[in-house]
Image: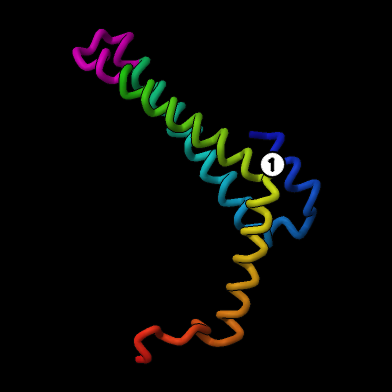
Amino acid sequence: HPQPVQDIVVKHKKGVIERQHELNRLAEGAMHAYAMAAALSRADQSLRAGAASAEYETRLVHYLCNESADWIQYNLGQLKSNRTQTSIELSKDISKTVCDNGGVVQVNPLGL
């Protein structure tokens, strides 16, 4: 996913290291793409060798690739979502409040 990576780097420049939510989505997308490539390679090897498990491995690869492709597409789409950006800002604000407070801010509902 070179375009989303370039978009984030161009938008945030050196501040990209502070964009953990976006970087996490990109990293997980890269891991899914790697898993797909590894699974395809393994299934290809089994098919070429005429392994008894080749048909089964092919079904596994179809499943893995379908799920991973959907996951990648959804999460890369979320990088540009206004709702996601709002959630990221809220998360940062909540984290700062918890850190400034030295722990959770709210009172335990049981009063403990």
| Residue, far left | 52
Residue 112 highlighted magenta (yes or no) = no
User: Where the N terminus falls, by quadrant?
Assistant: top right
In the image, is 11 to the left or to the right of 60?
Answer: right
Q: Relative to the observer, which residue lies in front, 54 or 80?
A: 80
Q: Relative to the observer, which residue lies in front, 101 or 59?
A: 101
- Dividing the picture into quarters, in which one does residue 15 lie? bottom right
What percent of the width, then of the height, locates residue 104? 49, 82
What percent of the width, then of the height, locates residue 84? 63, 52
Residue drawn at 59 percent across, 44 percent down: 26
The part of the chain drawn in magenta is 45-57
What percent of the width, then of the height, locates residue 4? 69, 39
Residue type highlighted by circle 1: Val
In the image, is 79 to the left or to the right of 29?
Answer: right
In the image, is 43 to the left or to the right of 4?
Answer: left
What percent of the width, then of the height, locates residue 55? 26, 13
